[in-house]
Image: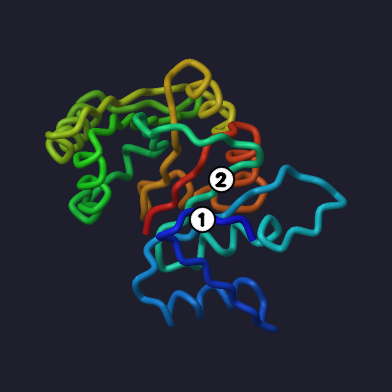
Amino acid sequence: MKEIAPDVTVSTVLSRSSILRTINESIKENPSVELIVLGADLHDENDDSLVSENIVEIARTSPIRTLIVPNNHSYTKVENVLAPCDITQIGKLERISKFKERLQTNHLKLSLLHIYQKDENLDQEKQQELEKYIFNNFADISTHIYYSQDPNTIKGISSFVAEHPVDIITALPGKHSFLYYLMNRSVTEAIYQNINKPVMILK
C-alpha cells in the first residue's frame, strides 16, 4: 500500500457483508469518522468495482457527509462551491450551520443555481422574499444566486459549470436539494461522470 503521509493511519476492514452494510457498521463503530470519500470509475461494462456499483446507495444511506470523486479528477484547491437547488423549496437554512461555518472559515464562494422548466413562472415577490432570506442566512459569505432555464437538469448544471468557476458541487440536505428529487443511479452518475466535478452530499 502506498504511503500517504507519516502522520496518516490507514486501516483495512475485511468483511463478508455487503459493502453498504460494512461501511455503515464501520461508521457506527468509529463515531469520529466525519466523511466518506468514494472514487467513481467511468461507466464500463467490464468494470466490477463494488464502490462504483453502490455509490448512490452509499451516499443515500450514509449518516455522514459523502464526497464522490469522478474518475481521473485531479486535486484542485476548493474556492468556488456550486449548490444546485430549488429555491422555492428552500427553508430552515439554519439547520446547515456546519456547512455555512465551513464556507466562512475557508473563505469559499457559494453559487446557488435554480434550474427551472420552460413553462415555470417564478412569482417576483416570492422570489425577492426568498432571495432576501437566503442572503440573510449567508450574510458573511460571498453568495450569488443564478437562474437557468433548461428542461434537462443535468444539461443545466453542465452549462453553468462550463461558464463559471466551479471546484465542487454540493447537494444541500433536505427538500431544498436537487438530489432530493433526482437521487437515482442514472442522474447521479450523469452528474459526477459527465460534469466531472466532485460532488459533496451533506447530511
Residue 42 place in picture, x, y as percent: 72, 42
At 49% from the left edge and 77% from the top edge, which residue is drawn? 26
Q: Does residue 93 sit above or below 192 in this rendering?
A: below
Residue nearest the observer in this picture, 14 or 195: 14
Q: Which mark is residue 45?
A: none
- At a point 55% along the width and 52% down the height, the residue shown is 183
State the image quarter where residue 79 is shown: top left
Depicted 26 relative to depicted 198: above or below: below
Q: Which amino acid does label 2 sit on?
A: Val
Question: For the point 43% across and 19% down, which residue is it?
Answer: 164
> Considering only vertical position in the picture, is 18 above or below 141?
below
Percent x, y of residue 8: 44, 61
Q: In which quadrant of the rendered image does the C terminus lie?
A: bottom left
The residue that disc 1 covers is 37
- Point out residue 121 in the picture as x, y percentages from the top left corner: 38, 26
Location of residue 21 in the rendering, given as x and y in whole percent from the top left corner: 58, 77
- For disc 2, the neighbor class at 10 Å (few under 14, some 14 to 19, many from 20) is many
Q: In which quarter of the image is the N terminus?
A: bottom right
- On the image, which quarter does residue 126 sit in? top left
The answer to whether 102 is drawn above or below residue 147 in the figure is below
Q: Distance between the residues labelled 1 and 2?
A: 7 Å
Q: Are marks 1 and 2 in contact (CB under 8 Å)?
A: yes
Query: Which one is nearer the viewer's eye here, 80 or 152?
Result: 80
For label 1, the SS is strand
Q: Which mark is residue 69?
A: 2
Please rate how many residues cluster around mark 1, counting C-alpha atoms within 10 Å: few if below 14, some from 14 to 19, many from 20: few
The mark nearer the N terminus, 1 or 2, is: 1
